[in-house]
Amino acid sequence: MPGTWILVADSARARLFSLSAGATGLEEIGDFINAAARTPGHELEHAQPARVHDRFGSNRHAIDARTPPRTKAAAQFAEVLKAALERGQAELRFHDLVLVAPPRFLGVLNSTLGPRLCERVLLRVAKNLTRRPASEIAEALPHTLSRRRAMAIG
């Protein structure tokens, strides 16, 4: 029987854990890095804007991006995570999904995942735990998850 996957993420890094019915703790099964989020802010925010030609004549002018570069990088990273979760769902590797992320990135994930993955989400935790060891992540999850796991065992 497929267990529960726990995605612990922020806009720069994501870790994927599995929690099976007979397991004693979390097993890390994936680690994702968003290199764009690690680019220094001044390089992303202060790069030269794109330039375009006017319709008439040879004048050029700068165009501003409508979406800030950091927001785009977070959305692209969420798409990468969505693809990994969709593969896992297609391979029947998990039944339930738990999302753990800071509030802003949790919102990006929720809007990116789509209805098929969202119906698998058992729990959403608005915390940044990406740098914590697996044991601390397990402790930070509500007891409802551990009770659900115990019911699956028994």
Image (cartoon, rainbow, N blue to C red):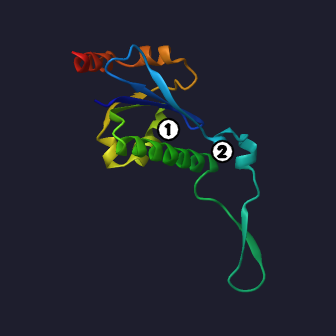
Q: Is residue 114 above or below residue 31?
A: below
> In the rendered image, which residue does mark 2 sit on?
36
Q: Amino acid at mark 2?
A: Ala
Identify which residue is drawn at 37% across, 17% down: 23
Residue nearest the viewer, comparing 92 with 14: 92
Give the mark nearest the N terminus, 1 or 2: 2
> In the rendered image, which residue does mark 1 sit on?
105
Identify the secondary structure beneath mark 2. helix
Q: Looking at the rendering, which quadrant does residue 19 occupy?
A: top left
In the image, farthest residue toward the bottom: 56
Left or right, 32 with reference to 61: left
Query: Residue 119 at x, y = what percent?
Result: 29, 41
Q: Quadrant of the N terminus?
A: top left
Q: Bin the neighbour count of mark 2 within 10 Å (Cα to Cα): few under 14, some 14-19, many 20 and up.
A: some
Nearer to us of marks 1 and 2 is 2
Identify which residue is drawn at 71% across, 86% down: 56
Q: Amino acid at mark 1?
A: Phe
Q: Bin the neighbour count of mark 1 within 10 Å (Cα to Cα): few under 14, some 14-19, many 20 and up.
A: many
Identify the secondary structure beneath mark 1. helix
Query: Residue 30 at x, y = what percent?
Result: 52, 32
Left or right, 122 with reference to 6: left
Left or right, 116 with reference to 83: left
**Dot label at residue 50:** none
Identify which residue is drawn at 39% across, 30% down: 5
Query: Residue 22 at x, y = what percent?
Result: 33, 17
Identify which residue is drawn at 36% across, 49% down: 114
Q: How many marks?
A: 2
